[in-house]
Amino acid sequence: MRKTINKLTIALLTAGLVGCGNTTYNSQTEVDTIAPGAPGEKPFWAYSGKTGIGTSYEAYKEGQYSNQAHTGEVSKVWFSIAKGMITETMFGLIHQAQLKDLQMVITGTDDEGKAFSVKESDVDALDISVDYLHKDSAGRPLSLAYKITSKDKLGRFVLEKHVFTDPDGQSLFVRSQINSSIKSPLQAYVSANPYINNNGVNDFANVTANGLVANEGDNYLTMQAKGGFAQASVGFTGKSDNLTSLMEQQKLAQSYTSTGETAGNVSLLGKLGEVNHSAQFDFVLSFGKSQAQSAKQAKQTLDKGYQAVLDAYNGGWETYLSQLTPLQRLTQFSADQGKLLHTSAMVLKAQEDKTYAGALIASLSNPWGDTVSAVEGSTGYKAVWVRDFYQVAMAFMAMGDVHTAKTAFEYLEKVQVKDSTPGNKGDTGWFLQKTHVDGELEWVGVQLDQTAMPIMLAWKLYQAEVLSEQELTYWYTKMLKPAADFLVHGGKAKILWNDTQITPPSTQQERWEEQNGYSPSTTAAVISGLVTASEIAKHSGDVAAAERYLEVAQQYDKQVEALMFTSEGVLKEQAQSQASDGRYFIRIGQDSDPNSNSKINSNNGREGMNKKAIIDGGFLELVRYGVRAADAPSILATLPEYEDESMVDNLRVKYSFTFDGVEGSFPGYRRYGNDGYGEDEVTGSNYAEGGQNTPGQRGRVWPFFTGERGHYEIAAASLSNSLSAQKVQNIKQTYVKGMELFANEGMMLPEQVWDNVGVNPKGYAFGEGTNSATPLAWTHAEYVKLVRSLADKQVWDHYPVVEQKLK
C-alpha cells in the first residue's frame, strides 16, 4: 500500500525541485496534490512504423555480455522513433517496454497576439525529418544516434532533438534545441507516458526531489532534466495529465505530486523552461530496480554531459563497423554508396538482447501497435523466431561478424524442445515457434523449416571455420542430431495447446505460420537440413546416422514435384492469368495430390480456396539452397505465374513500383495470393483492429521478396555463366536499389509496403512502409545477403553440398 502524501512531503518535493536549479516551480495546494481520473484512458502501443531504433554497442567477453568488458556497466536500454517522437523504450530484456512515448510541447503567443500550443503528436502541424548525428563524408551512418527536426508549419519555431543512450549506464539521453522566430518567449515542456514492466495499466507516478518517477513494483523510471524542471506534475493519461490544459490554456491547469494509491495509465509532465529566440535543454530517462538506482543513473548521465555520452556512444558503433571488413568491398555493389549497408549492420546488431547474448529478435516493434491493447504485456515482434533468426545470423556472417553469428547459433539450444521444456509431454528435437529471449514459451506450433535451419547454420559456420571440428561434434550430439532425427521421423508435439502428430515433410505450419501441409519453402529447408546433417554426422563419426539422413533427404527430394507441383492449375480461370499454362508450384497442399481441388484453411479473414489458386515465392527457396537448379523445368514453369501482374488482385502476387524522381520500376511481391495479413482494404483500418478474422483484411507487398527474387537472378546467371558486369549492374539497379527505395527516411526497412490497393486513410505513399512492423530484421538481413551475393557472384545462402548430394 502506498503512503498518502501529506503537507510535509509536498513541501519537501517542492523544495527538491527548487534545489535542482529552477525557481519558478508552482507549489501545489493541499487539496489537489493527488491526481484524479484513475486509472486513465485505455492504453495502446505506439505506431509501429519506426524511422529509427537505437541502443549502445557493447562488446562480448568470451561470447557473453559482461560489465567486465566495459568501463561502465552494460547498457540494457533500447529506444525507437516514430512520427518524430520517441516511442517504445525498453530496459532489462529487449522486449520489456518501460515507455510508450515521449513528446515535447511548445506553447507561446505569436506576433499577432494569438496564443498557441503545439505537441509533437500533432504531426499535421509539423514538418518532421529524421537524420543521423554521426555520418562519414559519403553520408553513411556511423552510429544509431539520431537528429529529429520538427518545423512548425506556421514558421514560429524549429525543434531539434538529439537522441541516443548512455553506453555506460541505463539512460536515454535527449537534447532539445529550440529556435523561435517570434518576439515573445516560448515555453517548452516534455511529456512522457510510462508503460512500466511492459504494460500500461499498473503504474504509479510521483514528483520527487530527483525528478519525475514512475514505477510498477521494483521497476522504476526517472525523468530528470539538467538543472531540474521549472514545473512538474504527474497524472492519469487522458484525464489529469495536463496535456489538455497545455493545449487549450498554454499552462498547467493544476499540478499534482502523485497518482496516489491507485495504479493506472500514468503520465509525467515537466516544464523545461523558457525559450527567448533560442534555448537548449538536456534531459534523460533512466531506469533501475529501485527509485534510488534510477535516480542515480539519471544523475550520472547528466553529470557526464551531452558530448561525453555522445562520444562514447558513437565510438562504440564506430568500433563495431570497423570490425566488419567486408563492408568496404560490398559498398560498391550497393546503389546508395553503402548507406543502407551501414544502417542494416547496426540495426541487426541492435536487435540482440544483452542479457541473453545471441538472442536475435524479429523487430523492435509491436505490429499495428497503435490499435493493439497494452492492458497486458506483449512482446509483439520483440521475440525469437528461429526462421527470422537464421536469416539474421547468415547476414552477420555475410557482413563479417562471425562472433555474433556463432553466439547466436549457441543460443539456439535455449529454444529447442527437450524433455525439460516446461509443459512438454511429447517428442523432442524440434525448435519452438516463438519465444521470449529468455526462452519463455509463447507460441508452440511446429514449423519444420525452423528445425532444419539451425543445422544449416551449423554447417555454414563450420565451412567458414568459425566452428571447429570439436565444436561441431559437440553441438551435433547436443542439439543437431535430435533436430535431424525429428526431420526424419517426426513425432508427437504435445505441449500447451498443441497435440499433433508430425509426419515430415508435411509441416504443421509453413513459414507464414498459417497452414499445414506440403510447402515448397519448408521442404527446401528440410532437405537442406538433412543433407547438411548427414555431412555433420560423418564429421562426428556417426556413419549410420549420416547414411540415414542422406537417404531420407533424397527420398524427400524425389517427392517435391509429386507433392507440390500442379499440372492442372486453375489460375487461368480463377485469377484471369494471361501467363499461366496450368503448370506451377502451389503455395501449400494439405493432401498428397497437387492436382486435387482440395481447399486450404481460411485465415486472417480470407476464406479458404482451392490450393491450386494460391501461389507464392516459396519455390525460389529450392533454388537458393541447392535443391533445384535455377533452370529446373518446374522452376522455369512457375516463374510466369509468379511474375504475372494481369491476375485479379486477390490472387496476384507481383506489383511493380515507381518512385518520384527515380527512373524505372522496381518489383515487389506479396507473401501469396489471398493473403489477409494486412490493413483492411475496405475500411483502411489496421490489421485485427476489428478482430483477427475481419473479411476485408489484405496482406501487402513485403520488400524482402525483392531480395529473394534478386537472389534467383544471381543463381540463374551464375548457372549459365552470364553474370557479366552488365548483368551485375542490372541486378544492382533493379533488386538492390529496389530494396533501398523501400527503406524510409531513417533507412529502416519495413515488413510491408503500401501497394495502392484499397482505401488509404493514413495517406501512405506508393511503396511506403505501412504500420505492420519496421524495421524488420529479416528484410535488413535479406538486403545484406543480396549485396554480398552480388559481390561474390554466387548466392550466399547456397549449399553446394546439397546440390552435389541430390544429383
Image: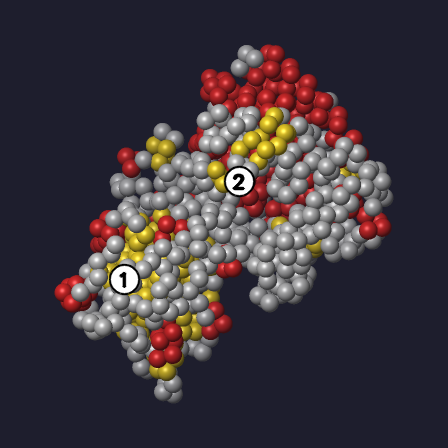
Left of 740 or right of it: where is 589?
right
- Name the quarter where the N terminus is drawn: bottom left
Q: Amino acid at mark 2?
A: Trp
When the figure is inspected, residue 352 is found, relative to residue 185, above or below; the finding is: above
| Residue 741 place in picture, x, y as percent | 59, 55
Whether residue 407 is visible here, answered yes or no, is: yes
Helix, strand or loop at mark 1:
loop
Query: Relative to 693, is 351 above or below?
Result: above
Q: Relative to the observer, which residue lies in front, 636 or 580?
A: 580
In the visual, does 740 lie left or right of 350? right
Q: Nearer the viewer, residue 178 or 779?
A: 779
Would you identify the image quadrant in which residue 542 lies?
top right
Up/down of 248 relative to 645, above or below = below
The image quadrant where one finds the C terminus is top right
Dot 2 falls on a residue whose secondary structure is strand
Residue in the picture at 21% in, 73% down: 29
**Circle 1 crowding by C-alpha within 10 Å: few under 14, some 14–19, many from 20:** many
Under mark 1, the amino acid is Gly
Measuring from the top left, give residue 585's x and y in whole percent.
Answer: 76, 39
Q: Quadrant of residue 554?
A: top right
Q: Residues within 10 Å of mark 2 (few under 14, many from 20)?
A: some
Residue, x 68% and y 32% (percent of image)? Answer: 506
Residue position for label 1: 260
213 sits left or right of 745 in the view: left
Query: Residue 656, position in %: x, y?
Result: 70, 55
Question: Visible in this render: residue 89?
Answer: no
x then y, percent, for residue 261:
28, 59
Structural distance between the alpha carbons of marks 1 and 2? 38 Å
Which label's residue is closer to the chain start, 1 or 2? 1
The residue positioned farthest toward the bottom in the image shown: 112
**What residue is shown with label 2?**
443
